[in-house]
Image (cartoon, grey):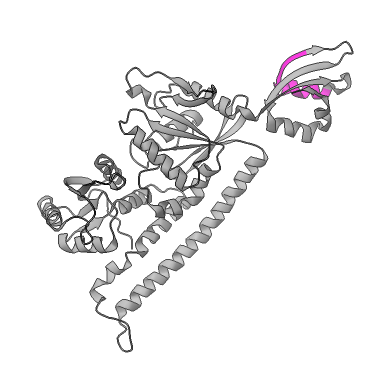
Amino acid sequence: MFDRYQAGEQAVLVHIDFSDEHEREDLRELEMLVESAGVEVKGVVRGSRKAPHPKYFVGGGKAEEIAQAVKLYEANIIIFNHALSPAQERNLEKLCECRVLPRTGLILDIFAQRARTHEGKLQVELAQLRHLSTRLVRGWTHLERQKGGIGMRGPGETQLETDRRLIRGRIDHILKRLDKVAKQREQGRRSRKRAEVPTVSLVGYTNAGKSTLFNRVTEAGVYAADQLFATLDPTLRKIDVADVGPTILADTVGFIRHLPHDLVAAFKATLQETQEADLLLHVYDGADDRFADNVDQVNIVLDEIDAGEVPVLMICNKIDLLEGAVPRIDRDENGMPWRVWVSAQQGLGIDLLFQALQERLGRTMVEYTLRIPPAQGKLRGMLYQRHVVQNEHYTEQGESELLIRMPKNDWRALVKRDCPQAEDYIISE
């Protein structure tokens, strides 16, 4: 039912420059999206307008130019770098005698190609069905003359309602299955919170190098490629951060400007890993001359998914492509890391990234001085076994005074399970 096109088709791209900054799209980004979808670009039609035309999105003359380009290049699909209404799609298809795909449809198709897990496929299908539900009438335009009323109900109206009912039923079915997935994810998050295991989520513009960085840090072997939306399905791995302990690192789908709302809604369960993270690693391509705009677009999406308040550590990636750039940590006025310069491809600055993670997540550490009586040698042995003793000396009474530093959750577990009276031996914090 959804307009999927096969790799290897020939396309004419349409890009319109609008005077309104919020309506503008990037032609280079469209070309990268088309390349990611496996479509051959035969020609590009450009133009400029103050506002979209209600009938063709472009003006009548430009629509004729697009139709001529389709015939000239023998293209079989027109891809717009913009969102089109169902009526605009129908009008253009009728004029050009060729399929028309808006930017949203192109992104949905790339997601459909990349989905690997059961959850990912369900999320993509949900987004496709929501997109398709507004365009159902297109398949039955030859029956539009048949109106309602006694003796006038025709197969077109009946079929259209049947299709709508089937799509609504399928959407409800998918939502129920995704709800189960969301509950499972929520259960996992609750378990990690109970154990006080911090979660760090990678976010950033698509093709910023998140998966390459994820692989470098975790050795997970996640698929990474120099193309848009190489990663679709979220992956979680455990890493060890000094002074913090086990930490969950999540690799998520890349963002893009004007991310279709159907996709944001469909990937709600996945994006919740971002919403409830303890720290976001906002990865951006430092060698991209549009990096500042890309960072702004990611922040817009983070606000949309209610993750705008989560603490952020910026990661400037691909410094091997920047002349004179070296791995380093940039700090704020309080001395805390706010940006790390790395090259995930070359493995540069990864040690600095772990150092920054240690400092940003290290606020969950506790430091106590304990005075342990000789009878509690077992507690002293457990602390040494955990490698948390910083210093030790003995009092005149033969008591051990230990300076310890350890993750707060490990201390709580020690008190709860192994030695409930350990808190009684604290003499200073």
Using residue 405 as the reference point, say whether residue 261 is left or right of it: left
Look at the image and say whether residue 385 sits in the magenta stretch. Answer: yes
In which quadrant is the N terminus drawn? bottom left
Q: Residue furthest bottom?
A: 151
- Of residues 390 and 23, the one nearer the viewer is 23
Snapshot quadrant of residue 409? top right
Residue at 21% x, 53% y is: 78
* Residue 180, image x, y percentages: 56, 56
Using residue 350 as the reference point, say whether residue 45 is left or right of it: left
* Residue 414, image x, y percentages: 75, 31
In which quadrant is the C terminus drawn? top right
| Range shown magenta | 378-392
Q: Is residue 200 above or below residue 426?
A: below
Q: Residue furthest top?
A: 396
Residue 228 in view here: yes
- Of residues 299 and 327, the one nearer the viewer is 299
* Residue 400, image x, y percentages: 82, 16
- Of residues 93 and 223, the one nearer the viewer is 93
Using residue 11 as the reference point, say whether residue 339 is left or right of it: right
Residue 231 in view here: no
Q: Is residue 168 above or below residue 417?
A: below
The count of marks equals 0
Snapshot quadrant of residue 199? top right
Look at the image and say whether residue 380 sits in the magenta stretch. Answer: yes
Q: Is residue 376 above or below residue 229?
A: above
* Residue 345, image x, y percentages: 39, 27
